Amino acid sequence: MFKIAAPIARSIRRPKYEKHIVHRSLCSSSKDSPLQSAETISSLPAPWSTANGRVPRNYWSQRSNRRAYFDWLHKTLGLKSMEDWYQITMLQVRKHHRGPLYMFDDSLHDALADSYPEHKFLPWRFTYVPHSFWNSLQNQRDFMDWIGNQLNIQQMKDWYSVSLEQMSKFRAERLIAVHGDSLSATLRAVYPEHEWQEWMFESRISKLEFFKASIENQRRYVKWLEEMLQIQSLESWYYVEQATIYSGRLKGTGWLELYQGNLSRALQSIYPNHEWLPWKFHSGVEDGFWTVAANRNRFVDWVSNELYLKQKEDWYRVRAADLKRIGAWGVLKGGKSWMDVVISAYPNHPWDHQKFG
């Protein structure tokens, strides 16, 4: 009887990267949750976690491998939910391994969105948005829409009461900086279809910037103001008190600040072709007005014509009530008295102060 030789035992050598192939197969299903995948592969050596951290060529070209990396990182960083990714910085990621991030220009958002397409990541909630993200007007609009939902914005006019401090809670300063650090400019760019009334914003700085930008901006505001005050003619402006413009309802603080708080000066700038009579403004003339000889002479000539004063002595019979009747309110408020104005206009005349009424 012949003995049958026992088969020669051969040690079977596993392919060099077999463990990585298995690794991919375990993570290939996009239905696996991050924590399930991490638990499944926890017993397998991750190629990026070895001493040299090298992975096989083209390893990151497989989405399953990229997902496996983030599953592992999710567990390594002690994250509990997808929301926790928003708190992670690139510095934290690099401490463990850069992984496939180089494929996404080091954008954590883009890399995660690729690995977990079933989850909607919000780019602006990460520490850094993807490169050139704010160059897209649609991205800007998506971001502002999201903030609007967070602030319970029901109508566009609700944006007027939003402060820069509130916006900073959502890291909105990154977008606002694109538009000159102006919230009103940001909203105009993002929602161009809406007719914004920039003077309605609560931010004093935003209003000042708007009014300083151009005289046309100021004219837009004044036209709106005339509608609000039911001003039918330019003459009606004489009866408007500055306190009315300063009221919260009319938001005129920023505009008047450009003119040292003087309504007559502001309107002369808005309507330069109209012949304004500054002394007729109920709010008074601007500071220093009566120090100008031309202004005094013009006032005296106008009053003389209105009250039919033929000679200088006729000024003695003028009373404050007469000046009110012809609308010379400005000369009765602050500064010099109307008698001082008249005397200054005719300095060489021998006035008798006791004869003035």
Image (cartoon, rainbow, N blue to C red):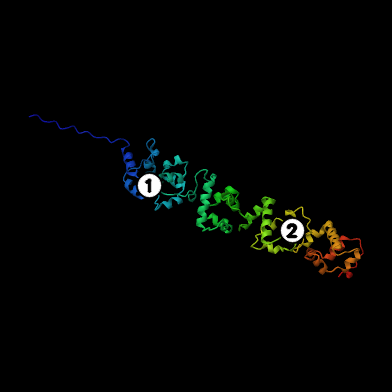
Q: Residue at x 88, y 68 (%)?
A: 316
Give the percent coordinates (x, y) of residue 59.
38, 38
As drawn, which residue projects farthest toward the right? 350
Q: Amino acid at mark 2?
A: Leu
Q: Residue at x 81, y 60 (%)?
A: 290
User: What is the crowding at mark 1: few (fewer than 14 residues within 10 Å), some, or many (at least 20)?
Assistant: many
Q: Which residue is mark 1?
A: 71
Q: Which residue is mark 2?
A: 234
Q: Amino acid at mark 1?
A: Asp
Task: Assess whether mark 1 and mark 2 are in contact (beta carbons under 8 angstroms).
Answer: no
Question: Which numbered disc, 2 or 1, marks the residue closer to the eye?
Answer: 2
Placement of 255 over or under 56, stated as above or below: below
- Image quarter for residue 65? top left
Left or right of residue 258: residue 60: left
Give the percent coordinates (x, y) of residue 104.
46, 41
Left or right of residue 32: residue 233: right
Q: Earlier in the sequence, mark 2 or mark 1?
A: 1
Q: Residue at x 90, y 66 (%)?
A: 314
Element type where label 2 sits in the image: helix
Give the percent coordinates (x, y) of residue 32.
35, 48
- Image quarter for residue 230? bottom right
Closer to us: 339 or 73 = 339
Give the percent coordinates (x, y) of residue 280.
78, 62
Left or right of residue 163: residue 339: right
